[in-house]
Image (spheres, rainbow, N blue to C red):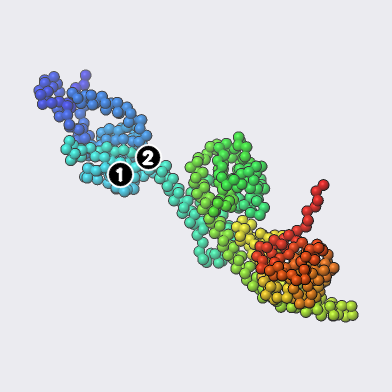
Amino acid sequence: MAVPERVVVLGASSEQHEQILQHLRGFPVDVLPPATPFSHLSKDDLPDGVLVIGTMASLAMRLNEINALVQHLPDGLVVLNHQQQVLWWNRRIEELAGTNDLSGRDFFGVLQNPQIEGPDFSPLNQALATSETTRTKLRLSDKQYLEILVSPVLDDHNELPLGLVVTVHDISNDVLEREKLNAIHQAGRELGDLSAEELIEMSVEDRIELLKQKIIQFTQDTLNYETIEIRLLDRNTKSLDPLLHVGMTEEAAHRKLFANATNNGVTGFVAATGSSYLCEETSSDPLYLPGALGARSSLTVPLILHDEVLGTFNVESSKAGAFSHRDLQFLELFAREIAISLNTLELFAVEKMTAQSESMNLVLREIHRPLSEILGDANWILDGFIGHQPEICERLQRVINHTRGIRDLIMKIGEAAQPALPHAPVAYQPAAQRARIRGKRILVVDQDDTIRQAANDLLVRFGCVVEAASSGIEAERLVRGYHYDATIIDIRLPDMTGFDCFVRIRQLNEHLPVILMTGFGYDPSHSIVKARQMGLKSALYKPFRLEQLLSELEKVMTPPAEPTA
């Protein structure tokens, strides 16, 4: 039997000292009082055996029970002596160190000398020096982070630290999630980061293309998703138009989808409901339509701004159950940044469109009066030569046609210069709001020049072509030589009543919709009553709102519904 070189007796009282030495005669023995800890021992001083006496024996049994428990803790636990060397550890420390040969080793050496990131950059020394608990973060690798809590073990008088107890907690998930959140926030800032020079020099299409490239880059680098599809919702048709796609099959990328909870896949469901959708297994999901080749799971979130769905963001994976609810939250955050960036681009486009539209409307307002006078005078002269001066009539008609052609050309140029914004808020699409009156030719008959000008200014904004007459005779001449879609006639004209004008226009074109208007219900000749008896469908009472005018125009120009069988 091997003879131990050194035995430590722990817990012996002074009365037991001589008796113990008698029993252990021939062995190198150190007898220590009960309060003496091992933490003062260096690696070279560790004994070959320990004898625990009296109450310390029951304590040792309790420690054995505790040891069995702490071996299964998810956190690492290690006891260090005053020289910061390992005396005891649990199983989690062995997993972090990659070995069970830890006795007497330097604590940071056990963890492969990690980078200390603070807040305390010397936690062991600080705990020993201050006798207070310290906390700091360690970085083992790009994807593994630990937090250590260092507590000093004090002597009986709570004055001198005899050793240290270190708790080691793996915070990798928390750190990586926080870094991902910061990266998403930073990506959001960069998505919409365009200098003033870029905004001036780049077209709307160029800006959108740049945004698409940034979205792809950040989705792959920050979220580590390779298969991407983003569609934007057309508010008018409810179609989901592809903005970008990476890794999707051509069939899937160009598939027609609409914001409908049924028969339009997960994407249509998400756009219709505004709720995210996690598809764990594509083969058994009733909503899923094939997207990426070999996809086994997918994650789709709505692009939402101010509670309004702008589109959808879809990612897919070749692994079943590849996405967690945490992934869903990250994608929703990134989708919010994308929605803000898309809205910013739309606002830039709207600003540009509004400036162009205002410029065009200003031109049309300025030419309205002289154009109306040219048309009125030319038609007046033409009326006098009809039947006996065909050459003059032909030239006058050419003047009239060219005058209208110049106006129509100006309107076409203005429309061509405006970017198409199918995904912009409806408030920025006045023409789209009133598609039924866009391009319609409206004749306004009123002796008040300010009324004629105001009607032109209002209706031009909605894409109407407006011409004006100051009298019933002038209106009659214009209707005789030109096709209008509707006419608005004031009941007080300098040469006839509104009813008389209504009758004459009906004789020239019985299908031309007519709206009579009067101020504050004033109608001494009962024009509106008599006109209603002859089929008048609409009347306006000044002052009326723009919405009323637009609604009445839409109503009179909408064909009656065909009777059902």
Judged left or right of residue 116, residue 19 is left
Secondary element type, mark 2: strand
State the image coordinates of residue 421 (x, y, percent, origin top left). 63, 59
Judged left or right of residue 461, residue 89 is left
Q: Quadrant of residue 436?
A: bottom right
Relative to the observer, which residue lies in front, 412 or 553? 553
Q: Which mark is residue 135?
A: 1
Q: Quadrant of residue 46?
A: top left
Q: Say few, some or many: other residues with alpha carbon within 10 Å of mark 2 (under 14 / 14 to 19 / 20 or more).
A: some
Kind of residue at badge 2? Asp
Q: Which residue is mark 2?
A: 170
State the image coordinates of residue 227 (x, y, percent, origin top left). 56, 45
Q: Residue at x 42, y 42 (%)?
A: 173
Relative to the observer, which residue lies in front, 161 or 561? 561
State the image coordinates of residue 162 (x, y, percent, origin top left). 20, 37
State the image coordinates of residue 27 (x, y, percent, origin top left). 15, 23
Kind of residue at badge 1? Arg
Residue 62, visible in the rendered structure: yes
Judged left or right of residue 458, residue 529 is right
Judged left or right of residue 371, residue 534 is right
Relative to the observer, which residue lies in front, 565 or 279? 565
Q: Residue at x 36, y 30 (%)?
A: 72
Q: Is residue 554 above or below residue 268?
A: below
Residue 479, visible in the rendered structure: no
Q: Say few, some or many: other residues with alpha carbon within 10 Å of mark 1 (under 14 / 14 to 19 / 20 or more).
A: many
Q: Residue at x 38, y 42 (%)?
A: 171
